Amino acid sequence: MNAFAIAFVEFVVRLAGWLVLAPLLPGIINKVKAWVGGRRGPPVLQLYYDLARLWQKGVVLSTLVSPGFVAGPAVAWVAVLGAALLLPLGPIGASLSFHGDVLLLIYLLALARFCMAWAAMETGSAFEGMGAAREVSYAVLAEAALITAVLALSVHSGSVTLVTMLTPAAGAGAVLLAAGLFTVLLAENCRVPFDDPSTHLELTMIHEVMILDHSGPPLAAILHGASMKLLLFAVLLVEAVLPLGGLSRLAAAGALAAGVLVVTVGVGLVESLMARLAFRRVPLLLTTAFLLCLFALLVAWKGGDA
Amino acid sequence: MKSLLLIILPLVGAALAALWRSDRTRPWWLPAIGLVHVVLSFWLFLVPPVVAPDAWLGFDPLARAVLPAVSLLFLVCAAYAVPYLQMHAERSNRVFVAALLAMLGLLSAGHQARHLSLLWIATEGLTLAAVPLLHFNATPRALEATWKYLLVGGTGIALSLLGSFFLGYASLHGGGGGDLTFVALASQGAALSRPWVLAAWVLLLVGYGTKMGLAPMHTWKPDAYGEASGIVGALLAGGVTTVAFTAVLRVRMVVAAAGAGAVADRTLLVIGLFSMLVAALFLLGTRDFKRMLAYSSVEHMGILAVGAALGAAGAWAALFHVWSNSLTKGALFLSAGNIRRAAGGRTMDEVRGMATITPHSAAIFVAGMFAVTALPPFGPFFSELGIVRAAFSAGRPGSAAMFLGCLLFVFFGLTRLVFAIVDGRPRAAARVSGRLFPETLSVILPPLVLMGFSLWLGLATPDVLREAWAGAVAQLYPAR
Amino acid sequence: MNSNVNLLVGLAIGLNLLALGSSRLPSVIGAVAVQGMAIGLMPLLLESDFNWIVALVAVGTMAVKGFVIPVLLRRAMRTANIEREVDPSIGFVPSLLLGAGGTIAAVALARALPLLPEHAGSLLVPGSFASVLTGFVLLIGRSKAIAQVCGYLILENGIYLFGLLLIRTTPLLVEAGILLDLTVGVFVIGIIVDRIQRAFDSLDTSKLTVLRE
Amino acid sequence: MTPGPLLLGAAAGLAAGVVAGRWNARVWLALTLVSTAAALGAAGSLLLGGAIWEFVSTFPIAGQPLHLRLDAVSALFLALVAIVGGAGSVYAHEYWSNQDYPQSAPRGRMWWSALLLSMGGVLLSWNGLHFLIAWELFTVAAFFLITLERQRRDVRAAGWLYLSASHLGTMCLFAFFAALAARTGSWELGPMRERTELAPLFWLALVGFGLKAGMFPLHIWLPSAHANAPSHVSAIMSGVTIKLGIYGLLRTTGWLPLPVAAPWILIGLGAITALFGIAFAFAQSDLKRLLAYCSVENIGIILIGLGGALLAVADGHAVWGRLLLAGALFHVWNHGLFKSLLFFGAGSVLHATGTREMSRLGGLWRAMPWTAALFALGAAAISGLPPLNGFISEWLVYLGLFDAVTGRSPAAWAAMPAAIILGITGALALATFVKAGAMIFLGAPRTAAARHAHECGPWMRGPMLVLAILCVAIALAPVVFWPLVARASGAWQPMWTEMPVPASLFTLGSLQIALAGLALAAGLTLWWRARGAGAPRHLTWDCAYAAPSARMQYSSGSFAGIAGGWFAWLLQPQRQLRRPRGLFPAIATRVERVPETVLELIFTPVATVILQVSTAVRRLQHGRLQYYIAYVVVALAGLGSIVVLGGRS
């Protein structure tokens, strides 16, 4: 009973953590961009305001859409949240961990993608169709890279369970893996150089253009889900690279937080220093990410042999 | 005695039918004689007589293993001939009926001949008896077909006569007393002079192969089958060819006894596979569905030759195939005849959508096509599978592969042509001619019965039949 | 006596060459007729003691091969009013060369095959092979039905020549063969040639190519 | 109750159905349903732990005593046959009814019963001869089902292609069984692993069964056949009959010794099949072709599982092999269920609009909500997304591969690329089915046909519902079905009889339930929230474009543009582009067609060459008698030379 209570409390805390902290990251990124651009920029908590406002707002639906238009974002949000809960947080471990959970994580993200694309197609808008097409297409390469990265981790740690996979550092291949995963992070979260969340030229967008028709609470769900996804990837990246398993609880938590911060700032810097790629070049970059992960995998394999 | 009756009865019947006055009732001679013949032959089949080793004629195991099938086929064709001849009442059927009956007698003779020259005489007689049947329609096309049949066939006959002379000389050279029964020849064994035996084998294989229709001596076949009526085609493909095949088997036995069995088998295998290949290539392109049947028959002769080349097991399967092929092919010829009459055309360019005009014949035609391309549970499937198995047991996987490859291409060719004829929208002209020749029960039943036999052969091959084939194999492939 | 036979065989071979060489159908028919009579004579020469059956066969052969068939052929020729083989698929000179080469080859072949001592000296075997070859050359090389029929007859004469080797030991085979050959001959010529003449109003078999793929 | 009487009853019922189908639809339907239920009962009773049922007749059929045997492997497939067979018969009652197809409906019922009967025969017979018989019969039955609508030329062409291709496979099986019988001396089948000289026969079986399964590049017959067949036939062919090819491979690999290379080849072929299959599927614009190619992909996944399992066996029965095999077997079921569901959906779309061209559809969800919802479910399931059944099997396969990698066995070198390709395949499948679902059911109707669509009736909706429920059941309670599959794997590989439910599968199952519940809750909440906020309907904003028309929507081709381009080397798409010209361009078109690349670029040229040879040979039959006689002489010479040479040797 007691243990259960503790476990329950821990679960609630973890849940709250994910839900509450996630929207922080876009804020930080924007701050960094503003800082680099020498502007004051929006407050770090901007997204929280937006979410609150959106949740209050009403909804306008296209005449064409089916209930799936609203259900899609909801399911996607659930999927991302579930994926996040599978992710262990350093020494605290995951709320739920089992042999092969990493595959569930990957496919939960896929589920989210499916729902978003479906919802986008609901409107029958050419722009949103374009966005959905880009999303699902680029995801093919991103998925390959992600699977390869996960393979590298499990080869290195000899396990298919996230907790044990992420305790040690990725070893010799860490740098390669970090680079690869970072690229995937940018792609999956539609950041520059793959996509530019701050532009409003529809033709150049992936994620933004998929949600043109969303409004009110559904849009809130989408935005919050996106931020959680970003946090998720950041955590995954950090844990893949840093050997948090070795550290004490406190140090680990600190390292994790610091790492996530670094990643976020990195994203901000990339966004402010780089321009968006031409769409022709996107596959090239993603393939590079895939190759990086592949090399990481090979390194991990050799490392195991030695 | 009964075995002699098998020969004499039809010949006498032929004479009487020739003298018979009424054109309308004469055709009934055919089923009548055929029925008696079937009864006799199956009686002999079930109660095989003892044949004196030196007998020139006799219902020996080989005859027992083959003749009943031919007799059965003849009876069904005879039943079909009655309505057929009534449809062609404008021509006198005197010669036709007589020739058919004479053919039956000579078939029985050929299958029972245990003597080199008797065998040759029977074959020659068959060649001649077929001539009036072939140009019964008396069209220029029929005449051309007959001319080619006669000259190519005549050449074959001449060659087999020379071959028989050679074999006789081989025995003479080996100190034989001039007894040309196969038993006596085989008993001379190695004493037979090898060069003469080999030369004789080549001549006889080519000669009787011409009658069988093995490539490249098959050239008369498409013309003859294409022009002849379904009955004649069925009897040529299912009866005359089997006589030639049994002749090859008997000669092979002598050659093997002389110690040249391996060479003989090699030649058989080569010419058999070659025939299958040629047939397959022709079938891929031909557009005439009666010539198609001829090429299919060439293919099946090739199958028989291959089977005979593969030792006892193969020969057993080949004898099985004689039965299944004769009966199934008969069904194809008869249903093709129905379709041909109703469609008023013979090529896939003229004939379409027969499934709507002659539904039953078309259905039988399709079923028969599947049957001859070795679709279970019809007879040919089992016999051909047996041959493939024999090829593997004989350690000839290459031959088996080529065999199956040919079967594949044959299947492509047949299905292509048959479905082109059966499916689609029929031509207006065909609708008219289809009304002229309606599908009466009397023309549907015979092919249906034959398909039934084919099915029965496959699903429930009677043990007595298997045992009969085994007996023939024991006679032809004595285990050393 | 063997020498007489060889003489006749030599004559037959000569006639082969004549049949091959001449373009005029009458002379080809003549050659066939003479050859038929020549080989018809042989059994009588071979048989030392007189034998009814053999005599009968001999006479029948001479009658049919020497008279009946040639007459029928001539009649068919007249009705179709064709005198000569115009466009042979194998020219006359090549045919002649083939025939000559064939004859030599036949002699060689006969040497290669083991013969009984009593046949060693006789020309029967080479003669028969040569005639068979000649027959094939005519069958393949001529386009007029009549010429082909002659070729067929020469082919059969050749086979008959070989049969003479066996006539003493296995008369039935030989005689049956001969008789049936004659029937075929008559059949072919009497009926079919005649019908072809009526149906196509010509005896040029190169016209008979309707049935083809 | 023992399977024996049930199976007998099922066989009798189906046999009666062959006759009854001709004259009375309802009687036939009742018969078929009862028989399939009986067969399902038999399979179930065995899978739930019943004893193996075996029957050897004293009387011979076709010269061999009838030897029937129902073990877990057979039962696994028999269950699928029964379920889809029953569902299809109900579906056909409306979809291919006597009113719509007076000629072909009776034939269709007859052949349907024949197909089920012969497939049962394949699954039960333990005698090579009877196996071949049943195999051929079911091939032909399927052919006549495909060509039910035989007045249409393309249907006939598809049917002929299917028949010919199958015959190629059949010839290989002829050789396989004949050689087997020749070496073992009997037609009896069964384990014979110790006879190592039989190993090479595997290659024959691979071609023969792989062709039936639609393994790349032997899949050439599959797309056109499945696309042109009536949809209930497509459903059973895609869902079940191609699985019999898998069944054959399972049996062969389970019974015979294998060449060392076999597992590697299998897993490699599986990976290629999966990737190329889904690439082709993604590029299709014909709904049923898309589904057909997707079947190719799923066969690939199953083959990966099977090949991996064989690697494990070669590797000393490693544990991960069981996961792979279980994944493959689960996928046999899952794909059978959701592919039939999807084809039923496609059928009702075709029934309602009369077109399979996705770019002519759109916005159908309003007219046919049931079909739309069920199709969406099937689409998510076949994309392998949690919380549905597709994910269960793919997860098992993934897990097996990953364990093989972490185990650092030699198999890892096959497992790593396989896992990566599986990932790419999964992502492409997702893209494919987003496209398919969206093009058909979402957005605005593109044509009048789509605008006037109507929902299908209860006879068609019912079977879809049943299949969907089964999908969800497997998805939410995999642990319930695990023992059944475990029994089958035990029957396949005796060393693997003990296969307890993996703890992780239990967790996964409960997570799937939780996820489903949460998703439902969240969806409803948000919908309620939106409704609560009024939710006025408005024209699609579309960046404020005032007059959007249906033809402005993203089309199937444009959706597939990006990823399809990456596979252009494989797909060889043929484009006809007419650019807009002038100041006021009147017309501009862009037609893009994805050919049957393998068929048109590999098989057709070969066929052409063969046909040319045939034409050349046929010239020899020119009607010139002189030459015919010359052929005889040639034959004399040829055989003579053979004899002379042979006499020497």
Image (cartoon, rainbow, N blue to C red):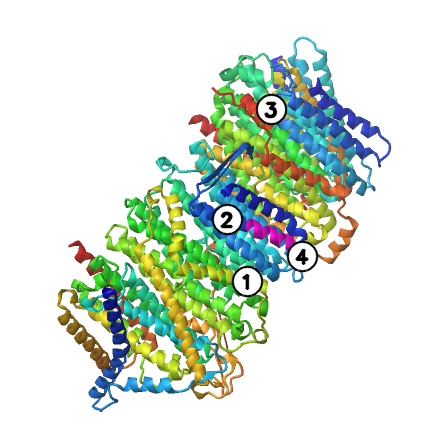
The amino acid marked with disc number 1 is Gly
- Tell me the chief SS of the magenta region: helix
Residue D34 magenta-highlighted: yes
| Circles 2, 1 touching at the beta carbon (< 8 Å) | no
Residue C90 magenta-highlighted: no
Sequence order check, earlier mark of 2 and 4:
2
Q: In the image, which disc is placed on residue D103?
A: 4
Horizontal side of D436 relative to A93 (left or right) equals right
| Circles 3, 4 touching at the beta carbon (< 8 Å) | no
Residue linked to disc 2: D41
> How far, Cα to Cα, is label 3 from label 1?
63 Å
The part of the image, by quadrant, that contains residue B56 is top right
> How far, Cα to Cα, is label 2 from label 4?
34 Å
| Circles 2, 4 touching at the beta carbon (< 8 Å) | no
What residue is drawn where x is 54% and y is 40%? B276
Q: Magenta segment range?
A: D25-36
The amino acid marked with disc number 2 is Gly
The amino acid marked with disc number 3 is Leu
> How far, Cα to Cα, is label 3 from label 4?
49 Å
Chain letter for mark 2? D
Q: In this view, does D200 lie above or below A292?
A: above
The amino acid marked with disc number 4 is Gln
Residue linked to disc 3: B62
Nearer to us of marks 3 and 1 is 1
